[in-house]
C-alpha cells in the first residue's frame, strides 16, 4: 500500500505518526507528574522516586516505539532526505497551535537522529533553531496568580496559601504565616527597602520534589523586585512552612543542575520558564527546562546556546583545570561555563573499568536522586565542531587518548560520544585559591556533601578532593562517577588490630580486603587537607571516620527510612 502513496501523502502520514507519538509521550508524562501531589500528601517518597525514574525513562521508550512505525511507513525511502524535508514542514504546521511547540520540535529531532544518526546538525531535517521567531500561540491566561497587598504581609501570605489546597490542614497556620511575614519584612529592610509590598506573583503550579512542595513567585515593592520561594513540608500533624527563600542565589540553588527534576504540571512550559528566568537571569534556559523534567528539550537549548557561543567567539577549547583524569579527558573554553568530557580509549592503572561500565554509572546518576550533590551531565552523540576552536595541544591529546571517539575530518572535529556539564572549580584548587572564610565553608560543606550522598544510598567511592567541585554558590558537589556505587553494596569494616609491630610498619595489609570492603578509619589519609582545614573538617565530620555512622545509614536505607535533605541553609528555615 505504501508504494502507491504520493510523496505529499507520505509526508502527511509521517508527520502524523510522529505527532501522535509526541501526544502519547505528553499524556503519559503529565499522568505521572500529576501523581506528585498525592505522593506529597501521603508522604510516600518511595512512590515519588519510582515515578521520577519512570518519567525519565519514558521519552526513550516512546521514541523507540515510533521509529519502527516510521520505518514501516516509509519502507526503503526511510533515508530519503528530501522526503524528510517535507515531513518536517508538515509537522511544523501541525504544532504551530500547540502550547508546547518547543518540546514537540525536540521530539521530532530525536526521531530523525535515531534514523539518520546525524553527525553535527542538519537544519533540513532537524529544528536546529525553532521554526518560530516568537511563541506561535498567544498566552490565553497567565501562569501566575497576582496578589495585591491589602494591609499586612501576614495577610498577604494567608491569601497566597489559601489558593493552594491540600488534603491536610496547615499544622501551625497562624504561626507559620507570621514567621514567614517577619522573614520577608526583615529581608526587605536589610536591602534598604520599604517593607510595604505592592504585589506578589506566584506561579499557579506547585513544584514537587522529594519530601517538599514549593510555591515559587516574585515580590514587588516600589523599588525592589525579588524572588520568593515558600518551602512546604508534610508533617504528621499537617503541612508546615519549612523555609522562605528570598534571594536569587537561594532560589537558583533550588533549581540547581545538581538536583533532580521537579514534578510540576503546566500546559505551557515556555511561559513558565520565562517567568523563572526573570527570577534567575544567570540560570541557563536549558537548565530551567531540565529542572522541570523536560530533559531532552533542556539538552536542545543547552546545545543551541553552545552553538551560538561558538559562532560568536574565536575562543578555543583547552584542557580543563584540575588533575588529569585516568578515565576521562576533560576540556573547556575559558569564555564558556561548561566542560566536555570524553571517555578515554584505555584507562590508567589501577582503573579496571570498561567504557560500558563508566557509561552505566552516568546513566545511574541520571535516574537517581541527586540530592543536590551530583552534577547532571548531558550525554551527546555525533557532535561536530569547527577545528579552529581546538588548540593544537588539545587536538594532539584527544587523538592520543581518545582516538576511538574523536576524529578530524578536514576543518571539523567529530566527537562520537561525550558528556557536557557545568564547569566547576575542582575542590583541591578552590582550597588553594579561595579566601579563608570561603575555604572553611567549602571544607565543612565537603563533609556535608558526603553525608547527603549517603542518605540517598550513594557512596562516591573516591573521596579525593579533586573529584569534588565547587559551584558559583560555594556548594560542594561530586562529579567523578567511575568509582561511584550504592552505599548498601559496600561492606564497612573496622581495621583489625595489628598482630605485631612488624605488621604496623609493613606496606602490605595484615588483614584480608574484599572487593567491596571500605575502612572509614582510612579516610583521613585521603583528605589531603592542610592542618588547619583538616582540624576544621574533623571538628564537624569526625563521625565519617567511624564505621558506626555508615552502618547505621545502611540500616536506615534497608528499613525504608528516608532522611530529610534540604536544598537551602538553616538560616532560611523558619524554625
Image: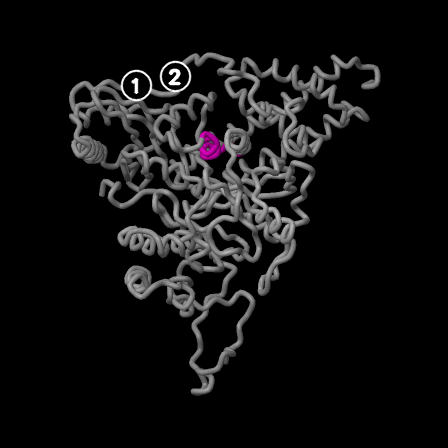
Q: Nearer the viewer, residue 306 or 43?
A: 306
Answer few, some or many: residues within 10 Å of disc 2's Cα (few below 14, many 20 plus, some between 14 and 19).
Answer: few
Left/right of residue 425 with respect to residue 163 in the rendered view: right
Q: Position of residue 157 (x, y in %)?
A: 24, 27
Closest to the observer: 439 or 143?
Answer: 439
Residue under pointer 1: 146
* Residue at x-position 53% and y-position 48%: 330
Badge 2 is on which residue? 142
Question: In x, y percent, where is residue 263?
Answer: 45, 33
Q: Is residue 259 left or right of residue 176?
A: right
For marks 1 and 2, give the CA distance: 9 Å
Q: Is residue 299 above or below residue 466?
A: above
Whole-percent x, y for residue 299 in the image: 53, 34
Where residue 278 appears, x then y in whole percent? 36, 26
Q: Residue at x 59, y 37 (%)?
A: 388
Answer with left or right where residue 550 lies relative to residue 542.
right
**Is the stretch drawn in magenta largely helix, strand or loop?**
helix
- Residue 296 lies, with reference to residue 496, above or below; the image says above
Q: Secondary structure at mark 1?
A: strand
Does residue 545 show up magenta in the picture?
A: no
C-beta proximity under 8 Å, tags 1 and 2: yes
The quadrant the N terminus occupies is top right
Mark 1 Cα shell of 10 Å, populated few (<14), some (14-19), many (≥20): some
In this rendering, does residue 107 appear at all? yes
Locate the C terminus and report the quarter of the image it occupies: top left
User: Is residue 366 in view?
Assistant: no
Q: Residue at x 56, y 67 (%)?
A: 515
Q: Which residues are magenta?
A: 285-295
Query: Is 492 displayed left or right of 404 in the figure?
Result: left
Amino acid at each position: 500500500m505504501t508504494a502507491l502513496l504520493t510523496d505529499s501523502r507520505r509526508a502527511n502520514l509521517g508527520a502524523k505518526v510522529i505527532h501522535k507519538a509526541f501526544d502519547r509521550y505528553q499524556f503519559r508524562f503529565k499522568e505521572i507528574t500529576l501523581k506528585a501531589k498525592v505522593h506529597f500528601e501521603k508522604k510516600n517518597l518511595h512512590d515519588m522516586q519510582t515515578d521520577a525514574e519512570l518519567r525519565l525513562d519514558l521519552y526513550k521508550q516512546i521514541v523507540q516505539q515510533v521509529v519502527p512505525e516510521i520505518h514501516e511507513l516509509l519502507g526503503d525511502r526511510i533515508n530519503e532526505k528530501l522526503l524528510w524535508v517535507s515531513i518536517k514542514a508538515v509537522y511544523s504546521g501541525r504544532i504551530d497551535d500547540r502550547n508546547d511547540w518547543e518540546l514537540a520540535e525536540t521530539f521530532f529531532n530525536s526521531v530523525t537522529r535515531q534514523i539518520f544518526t546525524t553527525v553535527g546538525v542538519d537544519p533540513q531535517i532537524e529544528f536546529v533553531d525553532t521554526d518560530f521567531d516568537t511563541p506561535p500561540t498567544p498566552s490565553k491566561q497567565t501562569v501566575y496568580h497576582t496578589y495585591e497587598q491589602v494591609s499586612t504581609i501576614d495577610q498577604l501570605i494567608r491569601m497566597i496559601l489559601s489558593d493552594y489546597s491540600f488534603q491536610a490542614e496547615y499544622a501551625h497556620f497562624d504561626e507559620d504565616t507570621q514567621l514567614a511575614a517577619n522573614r520577608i519584612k526583615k529581608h526587605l529592610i536589610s536591602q534598604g527597602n520599604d517593607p510595604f509590598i505592592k504585589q506578589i506573583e506566584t506561579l499557579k503550579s506547585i513544584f514537587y520534589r522529594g519530601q517538599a512542595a514549593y510555591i515559587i513567585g516574585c515580590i514587588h515593592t516600589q523599588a525592589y523586585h525579588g524572588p520568593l520561594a515558600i518551602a512546604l513540608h508534610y508533617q504528621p500533624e499537617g503541612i508546615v512552612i519549612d523555609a522562605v527563600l528570598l534571594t536569587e542565589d537561594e532560589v537558583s540553588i533550588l533549581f540547581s543542575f545538581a538536583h533532580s527534576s521537579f514534578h510540576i504540571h503546566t500546559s505551557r512550559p515556555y511561559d513558565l520558564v520565562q517567568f523563572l528566568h526573570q527570577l534567575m537571569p544567570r540560570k541557563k534556559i536549558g537548565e530551567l527546562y531540565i529542572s522541570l523534567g523536560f530533559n531532552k528539550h533542556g539538552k536542545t537549548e543547552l546545545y543551541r546556546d553552545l552553538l551560538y557561543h561558538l559562532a560568536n567567539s574565536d575562543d578555543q577549547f583547552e584542557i580543563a583545570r584540575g588533575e588529569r583524569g585516568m578515565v576521562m579527558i576533560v576540556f573547556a573554553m575559558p569564555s564558556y561555563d561548561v566542560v566536555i568530557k570524553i571517555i578515554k580509549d584505555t584507562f590508567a592503572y589501577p582503573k579496571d573499568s570498561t567504557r560500558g561500565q563508566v557509561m552505566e554509572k552516568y546513566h545511574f546518576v541520571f535516574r537517581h536522586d541527586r540530592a543536590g550533590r551530583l552534577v547532571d551531565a548531558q550525554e551527546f552523540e555525533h557532535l561536530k565542531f569547527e577545528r579552529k576552536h581546538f588548540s593544537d595541544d588539545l587536538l594532539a591529546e584527544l587523538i592520543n587518548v581518545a582516538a576511538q571517539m574523536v576524529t578530524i575530518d578536514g576543518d571539523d572535529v567529530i566527537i562520537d560520544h561525550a558528556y557536557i556539564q557545568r564547569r566547576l572549580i575542582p575542590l583541591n584548587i578552590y582550597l588553594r585559591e579561595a579566601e579563608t572564610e570561603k575555604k572553611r565553608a567549602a571544607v565543612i560543606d565537603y563533609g556535608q556533601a558526603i553525608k547527603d550522598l549517603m542518605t540517598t544510598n550513594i557512596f562516591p567511592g573516591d573521596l579525593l578532593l579533586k573529584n569534588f567541585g565547587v559551584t558559583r554558590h560555594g556548594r560542594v558537589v561530586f562529579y567523578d562517577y567511575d568509582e561511584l556505587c550504592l552505599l548498601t553494596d559496600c561492606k564497612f569494616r573496622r581495621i583489625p588490630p595489628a598482630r605485631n609491630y612488624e605488621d604496623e610498619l609493613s606496606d602490605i595489609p595484615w588483614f584480608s580486603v574484599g572487593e567491596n570492603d571500605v575502612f572509614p578509619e582510612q579516610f583521613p589519609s585521603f583528605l589531603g587537607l592542610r592542618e588547619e582545614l583538616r582540624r576544621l573538617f574533623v571538628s564537624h565530620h569526625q563521625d565519617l571516620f567511624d564505621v558506626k555512622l555508615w552502618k547505621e545509614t545502611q540500616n536506615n536505607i534497608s528499613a525504608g527510612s528516608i532522611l530529610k535533605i534540604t536544598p537551602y541553609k538553616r538560616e532560611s528555615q523558619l524554625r
